[in-house]
Amino acid sequence: FQVKREHAFGNSQLIINQVNGEWQVKDEKLVPYQEIAIYLIRQFEKVQLAHIKREGNPIADGLVSLGSTFTFRTNEAICSFKIGRLEHSAFETMTHVYHIQEGNTPWYHDIKRYIESGEFPIGMSKNEQKAIQHMSARYFILAGVLYR
């Protein structure tokens, strides 16, 4: 194949901007990779690199995972492959779900209590109190409901 134009997608805004030359590569270990990418880009008439966010794009995420499983050698032909959708689910739905509870209070009980009253449970160690204080800074209560 004599590919002259390439439109590539990536999920790392940092890498795309570094390869495009918009951002500087600061990690010296990555400079050789940037040089290889630039060399390869020069083999085409036109190359477009576009950023795609991983979340909400399972196909791009799957392609990234799939691409990392292949090893390519210089001057080696690369075979194409087809990606399709399965007619049936690749996994089975769970028939039994077991709920495990260690007590009657939810995991966030101590955080909520501290935010509401500034009190710690009796017998809580100083380290645990510091942890609750630290964690509670990330939460707030609105209409009796704890939010993060």
Image (cartoon, rainbow, N blue to C red):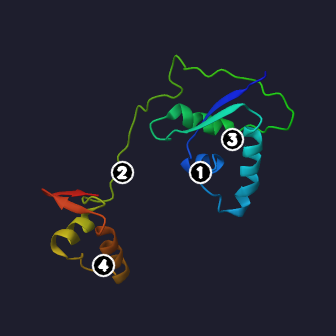
Numbered circle sitting on residue 127: none
- In three-dimensional space, the C-alpha distance between marks 3 and 1, rounded to whole angstroms, equals 25 Å
- Camera-side mark, 4 or 2: 4
| Residue assigned mark 1 | 22
Q: Gap between marks 2 and 3, in whole Å?
A: 37 Å
- Judged from the image, the secondary structure of the residue bearing numbered disc 4 is loop
The image quadrant that residue 138 belongs to is: bottom left
Where disc 2 sits, the SS reads loop
Q: Earlier in the sequence, mark 4 or mark 2?
A: 2
**Callout 4: few (<14), some (14-19), or many (20+) C-alpha neighbours within 10 Å?**
few
Camera-near label (1 vs 4) is 1
Q: Secondary structure at mark 1?
A: loop
The residue singled out by tag 3 in the image is 68
Identify the residue at image location x=19%, y=61%.
Answer: 141
Dot 1 or dot 4: first in sequence order is 1
- 145 relative to 5, above or below: below
Dot in front, 3 or 1: 1
- Report the Cα–Cα distance between label 1 and label 2: 51 Å
Q: Which of the pair 53/35 is nearer the observer?
A: 35
Nearer to me, 74 or 31: 31
Write down the residue under mark 4: 124
Q: Quadrant of the C terminus?
A: bottom left
Q: Nearer the viewer, residue 111 or 79?
A: 79
Q: Residue furthest left?
A: 143
Mark 4 touches mark 2? (CB < 8 Å): no
